[in-house]
Image (cartoon, grey):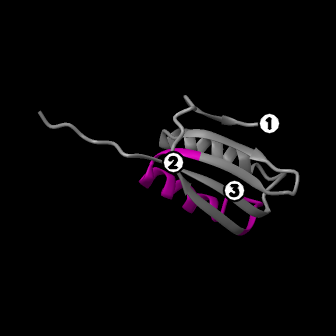
Amino acid sequence: MNQQVTTSTAASVTVQGRVQGVGFRYFVFKHARRQGLKGWVRNTSDGNVEAYFEGEKEHIDSLVDLCKTGPVGAIVKDIEVDWVEPTGSRNDFDFKYD
């Protein structure tokens, strides 16, 4: 039998620039779900967008690349990606409010 081994990883991402009020969270949400990633996305009080992505590394890399430009109207000045151990605590991808 041929079994594929899927390696799951995770990344904590912070996007800085004009990323609030331009649909950035929905943009991330839509693409994360398409990639089959788990995690969350939220606005921060300092005007950034934070996200946690969990899944296959190539899918996370693809979404991080999309976040470098974002949706129409966004101006991304910087993006920080910290690779972390996956927690396995999320069943899907959603918005986070706190």
Question: What is the number of the mark on residue 85?
Answer: 2
Residue 69 rendering spot, x and y as whole percentages: 65, 64
Q: Which residues are magenta?
A: 53-77
Instruction: Answer with the quarter of the image where residue 16 lies.
Output: bottom right
Residue 92 rendering spot, x and y as whole percentages: 57, 31
Q: Is residue 76 magenta?
A: yes
CA–CA distance in space, label 3 to label 2? 28 Å
Residue under the image location 57 percent in, 32 percent down: 89
- Residue 38 shown left or right of residue 28 in the figure: left
Residue 47 vertical placement versus 9 (above, below): below
Question: What is the number of the mark on residue 71?
Answer: 3
Residue under the image location 87 percent in, 57 percent down: 46
- Mark 3 element type: loop
Crowd rating for badge 2 (residues with CA inside 10 Å; few <14, some 14–19, many 20+): few
Q: Earlier in the sequence, mark 3 or mark 1?
A: 3
Question: What is the number of the mark on residue 97?
Answer: 1
The disc labelled 2 sits on which kind of residue? Glu
- Mark 2 element type: loop
Select label 3 or label 1 by which is in front: 1
- Residue 3 shown left or right of residue 24 in the figure: left
Q: Is residue 92 magenta?
A: no
Q: Earlier in the sequence, mark 3 or mark 2?
A: 3
